[in-house]
Image (cartoon, rainbow, N blue to C red):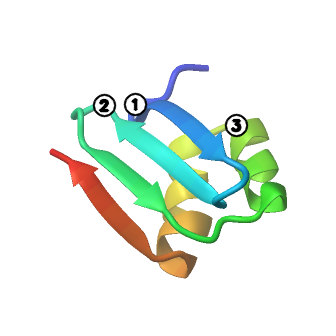
Amino acid sequence: MPSSVVNTYNYLEDKKILRIVYQSGAVYDYLNVSQKIFDEFKSAFSKGIYLNKVIKPKFKFKKISD
């Protein structure tokens, strides 16, 4: 199911970074994300809900671009 929040995502396993490209075009790196959390995000029915409830409150991030 396409997400109204997340356009694309990528996981850099060696760095434990989850990169999210939002529908707005903004790009954020969420830091120190475990493989388990990434797997749960990947299989979540709603990427936006999982992102807002699990990832955003628990992981530091860096804004890469607007």
Tally of numbered tags = 3
Give the foreground label among 2 and 1: 2
Q: Do the residues labelled 2 and 3 touch (CB within 8 Å)?
A: no
The correct choice, above or below, for 4 with respect to 1 in the image is below
The correct choice, above or below, for 1 with respect to 66 in the image is above
Disc 2 or 3, which lies upstream in sequence? 2
Graded by Cα atoms within 10 Å as few (under 14), some (14 to 19) or many (20 or more), the crowding at tag 1 reads few
As drawn, which residue projects farthest toward the front? 14
Graded by Cα atoms within 10 Å as few (under 14), some (14 to 19) or many (20 or more), the crowding at tag 3 reads few
Residue type, numbered disc 3: Phe
The quarter of the rendered structure image containing the C terminus is top left
Residue 4 appears left or right of 51: left
Residue 60 screen position, x and y as percent: 46, 76
Residue 30 screen position, x and y as percent: 49, 62
Residue for badge 3: 45
Residue type, numbered disc 1: Ser
* CA separation in Å, label 1 and label 3: 12 Å
Residue 58 screen position, x and y as percent: 56, 79
Residue 18 screen position, x and y as percent: 57, 52
Residue for badge 1: 4
The correct choice, above or below, for 20 with respect to 28 in the image is above
Q: Are marks 2 and 1 in contact (CB under 8 Å)?
A: yes
Residue type, numbered disc 2: Gln
Give the foreground label among 2 and 3: 2
The quarter of the rendered structure image containing the N terminus is top right
Disc 2 or 1, which lies upstream in sequence? 1
Question: Which label was assigned to residue 23?
Answer: 2
